Image (cartoon, rainbow, N blue to C red):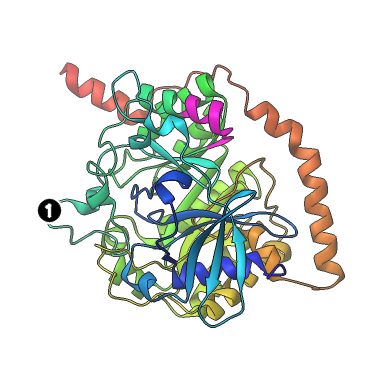
């Protein structure tokens, strides 16, 4: 089956998961399953070849619903080597896929003696790093924790609890040298008013000593001037995970976020940063498959309307999460959602797929979603041509931004000055 649509297959795998046949030798051929950060990447990384591009997918394999999947991964030893295929129980399908191997740097240790895979992991082709302590929403009995998330279970167990700046720099350098990463994504749990500020030294070190694009994902700051500081340090991307557009769903499944931060704070910060950093530099992140599809479509249009791109996660009922009892969504509904992701970016002229060598396995990106929209007319073809030209034009700018270079000094924050004054009294 050579004409499979890789975007449609990715959605089917996100929603249905995958059974792994006994013939597979994952310990030999695949990246180990990494249950880190919020847990969304707790599946098997695989790549689906397509006519336009290769799609990277982190497929659920350990969750209960995946054990009932019609899809099965099998291995056949052939003259050209080990060949993996996806078989479907009810279709005449044998889709060839390949599994990215575990990089050697995963087992290397930092100068502090921490295994690098405990500091950061590849999720597609970029390096994801969780910095800071356990999200404050998990404090006490975890009643404020987001119900889809397992950060409070993973951090300090599956990954190092406290990562030093040196840990992150050394890991990023190793990932850049061996895996060719161009992007490091930093995210943090809620730590009050200092959440965004706490990421500044990590950003500076990555920009000055590694030379990569850097993204920051954190609960939004009330003081919007903190984003000017991140811009000065060279942050390339900001993402705001407000999860649900329907406030009732946000209150139900993300009680801490709504109580301590509030959806309006997310929307205000996203709109501000989309203007500050430029169109296509920020994203609004939501979950699809829980709230009504109409709410998700409204979210996608609003995010794109302010100049950001929608990052839509297919709901995954993770083992150990508060929402693990909910069913995964229907792939047909997700196709409607992701078609709108592509169309909304085109409608609002949000450039996507510009940065080099960033393939995301946790979601279908807007650039991936383009493969769901076929023969969409002249406007769509013109938009694709404009994006292709944009990638050529912006190549020197991204190359410049990926050069390690000193960053300007930042003035002391008013909060730091206030604390210093109190300490001297």
328 vs 342: above or below: below
The number of discs equals 1
Residue 419: x, y in percent? 24, 26
Q: Is residue 363 above or below residue 246?
A: above
Instruction: Name the outermost residue toward the left.
Output: 140
Q: Residue at x 35, y 43 (%)?
A: 188
- The residue depicted at 49 percent of the width and 24 percent of the height is 173
Q: Which residues are magenta?
A: 172-183
Residue 84 image-quadrant placement: bottom right
**Residue plotted at (32% across, 38% down):** 194
Name the residue tied to disc 1: 140
Work out whether residue 300 can be spotted: yes
- Specify whether 105 is left or right of 176: left
Q: Nearer the viewer, residue 250 or 215?
A: 215
Q: In the displayed structure, would residue 400 be above or below residue 39?
A: above
Query: For this rendering, which residue is in front, 51 or 379?
Result: 51
Q: Is residue 177 magenta?
A: yes
- How crowded is the residue under tag 1: few (<14 C-alpha within 10 Å), some, or many (20+)? few
Q: Between residues 111 and 253, which one lies in front from this camera angle?
A: 111
Q: In which quarter of the view is residue 380 placed?
A: bottom right
């Amino acid at each position: 089956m050579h004409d499979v649509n890789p975007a449609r297959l990715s959605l089917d795998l996100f929603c249905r998961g995958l059974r792994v046949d006994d013939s597979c030798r994952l310990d030999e051929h695949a990246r180990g399953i990494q249950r880190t950060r919020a847990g969304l990447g707790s599946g098997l990384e695989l790549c689906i070849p397509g006519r336009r591009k290769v799609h990277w997918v982190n497929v659920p394999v350990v969750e209960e619903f995946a054990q009932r999947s019609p899809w099965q991964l099998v291995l056949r030893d052939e003259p050209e080597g080990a060949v993996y295929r996806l078989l479907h129980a009810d279709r005449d399908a044998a889709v060839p896929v390949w599994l990215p191997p575990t990089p050697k740097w995963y087992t290397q240790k930092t100068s502090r003696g921490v295994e690098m895979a405990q500091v950061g992991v590849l999720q597609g082709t970029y390096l994801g790093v969780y910095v800071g302590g356990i999200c404050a929403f998990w404090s006490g009995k975890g009643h404020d924790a987001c119900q889809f998330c397992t950060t409070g279970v993973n951090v300090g167990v599956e990954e190092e609890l406290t990562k030093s700046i040196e840990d992150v720099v050394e890991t990023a350098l190793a990932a850049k040298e061996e895996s060719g990463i161009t992007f490091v994504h930093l995210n943090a749990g809620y730590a009050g008013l200092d959440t965004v500020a706490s990421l500044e030294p990590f950003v500076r070190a990555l920009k000055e000593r590694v030379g990569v694009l850097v993204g920051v994902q954190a609960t939004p700051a009330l003081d919007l001037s903190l984003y000017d500081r991140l811009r000065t340090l060279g942050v390339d991307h900001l993402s705001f995970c407000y999860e649900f557009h329907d406030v009732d769903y946000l209150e139900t499944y993300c009680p801490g976020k709504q109580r301590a931060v509030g959806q309006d704070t997310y929307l205000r910060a996203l709109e501000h940063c989309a203007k500050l950093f430029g169109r296509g530099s920020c994203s609004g992140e939501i979950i699809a498959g829980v709230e009504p599809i109409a709410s998700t479509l409204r979210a996608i249009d609003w995010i794109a309307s302010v100049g950001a791109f929608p990052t839509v996660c297919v709901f995954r009922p993770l083992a150990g999460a508060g929402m693990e009892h909910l069913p995964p969504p229907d792939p047909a509904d997700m196709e409607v959602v992701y078609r709108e992701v592509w169309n909304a970016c085109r409608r609002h002229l949000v450039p996507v797929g510009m940065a080099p060598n960033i393939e995301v396995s946790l979601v279908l990106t807007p650039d991936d979603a383009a493969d769901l929209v076929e023969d969409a007319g002249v406007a769509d073809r013109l938009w694709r041509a404009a994006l292709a030209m944009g990638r050529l034009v912006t190549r020197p700018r991204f190359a410049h931004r990926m050069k390690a270079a000193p960053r300007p000094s930042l003035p002391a924050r008013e909060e730091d000055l206030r604390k210093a004054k109190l300490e001297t009294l």
